Every structure is written in C-alpha cells, then in structure tokens.
Amino acid sequence: MDGTLSLKEDLARTIRRMYKRGLVSGVGGNASARLRMKSQILITPAGYFKGGAVQGDLVRVSLEGEVITRGRPSSELPTHLVAYRNREDVNAVVHGHPPNAVELVSVGMKIPVMTPEHAVMIEKMEVVDFVVPGEDGAMAIATKLKRCDLVGIRNHGFFSMGKDLHEAASRLEVLEESSKIYLAGRLAGSVTGLSEAEQRRIREAYGRE
Ligand SMILES: [Zn+2]
C-alpha cells in the first residue's frame, strides 16, 4: 500500500465538502494532493461536477506536468505545480471561490481577523490583481505562495495550501466564515476584527508562538 487509495478518498471527500460548504460552484474550483512518493500529485479533472466527486475521476500528474493516468487535469494545474515545486512543506492545494471573501478582496478591502480560528490558521494572506487562470495565473501567484499559505485573486478566488487536505480546506472555510461575520456585522452596526495583541494571545494559547 503506497497510500494512493486513501489519498484519493480524502481528495474526493474534500472537494465534495467544499461544494457543500459553498466554497466552490458545481464546475468551479479544484484541489490536489501530493502522493507519498513526493514527485507526483493527484488533481481534480477539468470542468466536472464537484458535488459528485469520486476517486476514479482524479488525475495523476508528475511535478513536471506530465499526465500519468487517463484524464484531463484542471486548467489550474500550473498553479498547483508551482506551489509543490516551491514549498516542500505543502502536501495539498485547494482552490475555491468563497463568495463573501472574493467580494471583499474584489472591492479592495482587507478581510479582518474575526475569529480565533482565523488568527491561528491564517497568519498571512496576500492578494493579487485579476489574472487569467492557467500559466499567467501561476506566474503571478508563484512569488506570493513562497511567503504565505493563502493567496487571493481579485474577481476570482483563493489558493490555499496546507500540510494536508484538511488544513488547506479549513483555511478557506475559516476565511469565508470571517468574511461573512464581517459583512453581516457592518450591516448590523460597527464591527472590528481582533486586535494584533488579541491575535498574539490566541496564538500563544494555541501554542503557535
Ligand atoms: Zn477558480
């Protein structure tokens, strides 16, 4: 057993979870995970229904971009590969379109740290201007991916990286949760994020600093 089967299950489950949580649309978004052999990944195929993702749909690709098994990988493959090549600590990449978070970065607003989970899971996020998905997108995002685990793209979505699929997907969930709370809070009254000092105390309590 090289762990491929369980990773396939995990990847199919993750993309269904993202669909259920509204972080990807039926045909939008994609996810990948690094195989134990390190030089290959599994990625979701191009333009298929995320709500019904199953293991057999996933495409195996080398870090050089060579398709090893049958299927056409996501058009965002170049960005996923850039992340794995530049970050040895990254074993999963998730790309989604969380609507409230996309709205905030698209109007040029910062997403405040609204919850303890946000403080712990997203220490740094970068945003790039709109770029056409594919090779151009990979180049624009490449420099940012080296410095943080979450990159937003105006009028598009986010790339989240993690040591595993759970961490990468959770970062997107936590970001969208903060965005929803912030936007609802602005309608209800004045709302602010956690202060730097509060964030530091939370990270200390969670053992991150
Ligand atoms: Zn997208």
Image: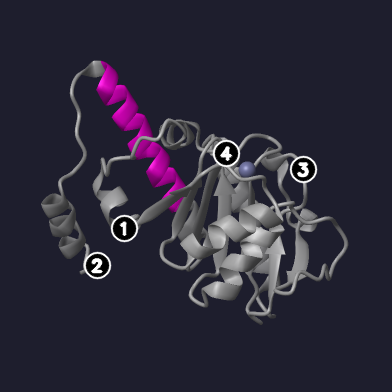
For mark 3, does the 10 Å Cα neighbourhood hold few (<14), some (14 to 19), or many (20 or more) residues? some
Q: Mark 2 belongs to which amino acid?
A: Arg
Residue 55 figure quarter: bottom right
Predominant SS along the magenta part: helix
Q: Amino acid at mark 4?
A: His
Q: Which residues are magenta?
A: 170-187
Q: Secondary structure at mark 4?
A: loop
Beta carbon of the mark 4 residue lies under 8 A of ligand 1: yes
Front disc: 4 or 1: 4
Q: Which mark is in front, 3 or 4?
A: 4
In the image, residue 8 sits, relative to residue 126, either above or below, namely: below
Distance from label 4 to label 1 (Cα)? Answer: 22 Å
For the point 51% across and 73% down, the residue is 87
Residue type beneath disc 3: Gly
Q: Residues within 10 Å of mark 2 (few under 14, many from 20)?
A: few
Q: Quadrant of residue 110?
A: top left
Q: Is mark 1 within 8 Å of ligand 1?
A: no
Query: To which residue does mark 4 refer?
Result: 156
Q: Give the spatial CA distance, label 4 vs label 2.
A: 31 Å
**Which residue occupies 44% across, 48% down?**
127
Q: Which quarter shows the C terminus?
A: bottom left
Residue at the spot x=62%, y=48% of the render?
15
Residue at mark 2: C-beta within 8 A of ligand 1:
no
Disc 1 residue type?
A: Glu
Q: Earlier in the sequence, mark 4 or mark 1?
A: 1
